[in-house]
Amino acid sequence: MRISITGKICFILLIIFSSVLISTTLYQAYRERQLVLQIGIEHVSSLLQSYKNGLDFIARNHHPDELAIYQQTIQKQENVQRAKWIQAEKNELFTTVNASNFPSDQLEKQALQGQTIQQILTKNGKTTVVAIQPYYRPDSQDIDAKPVAAIRLEYALDKQLDLVEQHILISAIMLSVIFSAILLMTLALIRKQIVLPLQQLRQAIDDVADFNDLSTRLPVAHNDEIDQLNDSFNQLMERLATNPGNHRLAETGYSPPGNLPPSS
């Protein structure tokens, strides 16, 4: 199957532009997703600090009954899926303990041992930041003190990630339009600067071969490879035209015997 130069160049440029588009889109999606996750973690840390400050106030003023109300206030904030107060046993700060306050998994047990937990969980297409922080007595000065409880927050990132996907889709469409326009302009320029001059050269050679027209000349406007090829063609035609023998042969269309194929 014959493929033109334009087709070959178009295929190569299409591969290059497609590779650039795909790699750019994937990198942008990765960077924006990482940015959303980072902002989500920072926001959860800020919420945890606010949660802790409110608990410190409740503990100092000895109003443990306000704990449930404050916890509901935290949980009503946008994208907060869960706010939990974790306490394994009663203490003098928060005497009210029920089944909902008991540690329900290994992460919560680790937090009660003094570990700070931060995880990003993805399940059923939903992405959630889970943060669990140990809670110490607000007046404790002992660096070896054990936490009296822990606080847990789960923050959903679905809305932010959906916005990222929409932004990536719009960016990909815009880049596709831009690359398509660049591709068309590049092909038009290649056709004008390379393909058409080559077609003119081919036509000139055909005219010489078919009609013995030694007066054919090609334009030489620049000093690129195409013009150098045209100049070489013009010089050849000049030499052939200035040779009297070639000139007469061109007029009669006669080929010298030396150019005939040997007889069998």
Image (cartoon, rainbow, N blue to C red):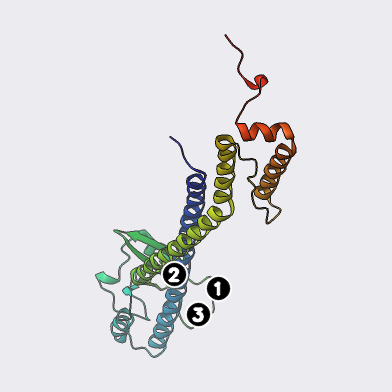
Q: Residues within 10 Å of mark 1 (few under 14, many from 20)?
A: few
Q: Residue furthest bottom?
A: 61
Q: Which residue is mark 2?
A: 36
Front residue (pair 3, 102): 3
Image location (x, y in percent) of residue 98? 25, 73
Q: Where residue 51 sits: x, y (%)?
A: 40, 81
Camera sees residue 114: no
Residue depicted at 56% across the width and 37% down the height: 211
Please say if 49 is above or below 2: below
Q: Residue at x 31, y 84 (%)?
A: 73
Q: Residues within 10 Å of mark 2 (few under 14, many from 20)?
A: some
Q: Amino acid at mark 2?
A: Val
- Residue 108, x across and y down, in percent: 37, 64
> Looking at numbered disc 3 in the image, what kind of residue is underneath it?
Ser
Question: Which residue is identified by label 1?
Answer: 143
> Which residue type carries mark 1?
Ile
Query: Furthest-left residue in view?
Result: 99
**SS at mark 1?**
loop
**Left of 115 or right of it: where is 90?**
left
Say whether marks 1 and 3 touch (CB < 8 Å). Answer: no
Answer yes or no: do the residues labelled 2 and 3 have beta carbons within 8 Å? no
